[in-house]
Amino acid sequence: MDVDDTYCEPSGRIEPGPPAGPAEGPPYAECVLCREPTEYPESTKGATLCPVCAWQEAGRTACSG
């Protein structure tokens, strides 16, 4: 098997990734508990929860007898 040392070397200039921060896209609905943006668009009906509150709510409902 022939080993090529240049295989993993990037070709050309490496550009930095996108900046961290809120995702761009449609306006997102607010969480009904903490008012942080959710991953759902504003047009979503019902009680929208951010990922953190959804995880905490799942833990509460799983542990309640």
Image (tube, grey):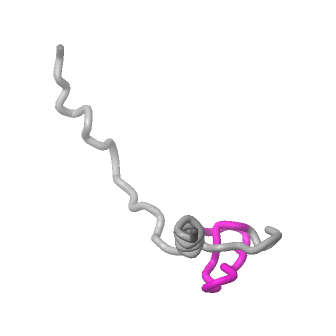
Say which of 54 and 1 sits in front.
Answer: 54
Say which of 64 and 54 sits in front.
Answer: 64
Segment tinted magenta in the rendering: 22-40
Can residue 34 be seen here? Answer: yes
Left or right: 45, with 60 as reference point: right
Say which of 44 and 14 sits in front.
Answer: 44
Please count the marks in the image.
0
Q: Position of residue 64 (x, y in %)?
A: 57, 71
Q: Position of residue 26 (x, y in %)?
A: 72, 69
Q: Position of residue 30 (x, y in %)?
A: 69, 80
Q: Position of residue 47 (x, y in %)?
A: 75, 74
Can residue 22 be seen here? Answer: no
Q: Please name the residue shown 63% across and 77% down the image.
A: 37
Residue 1, quarter of the rendered image: top left
Left or right: 52, with 6 as reference point: right
The residue at the far front in this view is 65
Residue 36, quarter of the rendered image: bottom right
Q: Please name the residue shown 66% across and 79% down the image.
A: 31
Q: Which quadrant does the C terminus fall into?
A: bottom right
Image height of 19 relative to 33, above or below: above
Image height of 4 relative to 18, above or below: above
